[in-house]
Every structure is written in C-alpha cells, then in structure tokens.
Amino acid sequence: MIAYTKFEVLRTLHNVRYLVFVVLMPVVFEIIWGKQGTGVTAAMAVYAATGAGLLGSGNTIAEDRGSGWLRQLRVTPLSDRAWLVGKIVQGVLTVIPGVLLVSVVGAITTTVQRWPLLVAVTVAGSLPFVLVGVFAGTLFRGKTAVMALSVVFFALMFVGGVIGGETIWSLAPTHSLMTLGAGALGIQPFDAVPMLNLGAWTVVAAAAVLLRWRRA
C-alpha cells in the first residue's frame, strides 16, 4: 500500500491542473491580498486545502475508472481495503504542498508568526474534503467528476465565506475550517463548534464513501 500511495502522490504532483489550481493560485492570491491581514492567509490555506482535498484523490479515481485501470488493479495483490485507505492518505498528503506554500508566503510577506500551527490545522481539517473527493471519484467517471468537484469547490468557497468575504452558511465545512485557521493564527480564540461541525462532516462523508465502496 505504501508503494501504491507514493506512486499516486507523485502522479498527482505532476498534474498541471493540480499545480495551477490548488498550489499556484492560492499563493498568488496570498501575495496580492495578504497585506490586508492574516485572515487572508487563513482563507487561502483553506482554499488550498479544500481544492487539493477534493481533487487530489477524486480526480485520479475518476480517471482510473474511466480508463479501466481500476479493473487492472483488482488482479494485483493490492486489496480493495488497502486501495481505499491509500487513496484517502494520498488525498491528505496532496493537501500539504499548497497549504505549506501559502503559509510560508504569509510568514514572509506579512506578520504571520504561527504558520506551522495553521498548516497542521488545515491539513488535519481537510479530511472531510478528501472523503467527498473520494466519494465523487467513485460516483462519476472522467471529466464529469472534475466538473462536479469544481462546482462543489466553488460553492463551498462562496457559502463558507472564503471567497467574497461574507458567510452565507455557517455550517459549511469551509467556514468551520477557516474559523479554526483564524484560531491557529491567533486572530480569534479556538472554538469547539467548528471542530464538532468538521467532525460531523467527516462522519457523513466517510459513511457515504463506505456505502459507495461496498456497492462498487
């Protein structure tokens, strides 16, 4: 499983869409708007975590299903359970580059001092997005999954207040993760409510993944 996960992570890191969409863009936004305050750094870290979480594994699963690669994997020693765990681990690991770069740029260009804690919080909080991505990858094939995940991504960005500056839905996982990111940077105190909300999203997404995986 370790070798397979390593292969999939490297495969994702070589994907131009991934590099531009979830690594380069939030870093550019951080450079442009970062001087408005450390809240921008928290928001861009959530942008990177959400985008990479949704697309990191979801995109590759959909592509593999469309190409028939998953059928080929079934004849290898890799078990279905190891494959599923590997895809989830892959999704979390591919969150790190974008979040790390945004946080480091924030530390260099602004007064962000607790950026390692921001990285830890946003990477850990990316799990529900990773699970949603895995679910979508097992539900759709090829470019359909990318389109669906892109719609989900931008919807979560807007309703959670990451983009646009106004929170439309306080229970959106993006809003909860941004609140925790702000707490990590000392903008506001840590609160248990966003943690519980992210936990609830994780449980629901995990249940959806398991149900879909058993039917696949």
Image: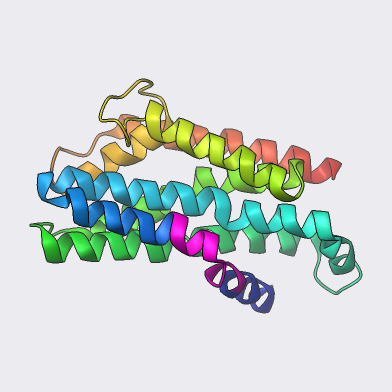
Boundaries of the magenta span: 11-21
In the image: residue 107, left or right of residue 155: left
Magenta stretch encompasses residue 83: no
Q: Quadrant of the C terminus?
A: top right
In the rendering, at what x and y percent does residue 25 appear? 37, 55
Which corner quadrant of the image does residue 23 belong to? bottom left
- Which residue is most to the right? 75
Position of 20 relative to 78 (above/below) = above
Residue at 88% over, 65% down: 74
In the image: residue 159, left or right of residue 87: left
Residue at 71% over, 55% down: 61
In the rendering, at what x and y percent does residue 155 appear? 47, 31
Position of 193 relative to 137 (above/below) = above
Magenta stretch encompasses residue 19: yes
In the image: residue 163, left or right of residue 205: left
Depth check: 21 or 49 in front? 21
Which corner quadrant of the image does residue 57 belong to? bottom right
Residue at 21% over, 57% down: 31
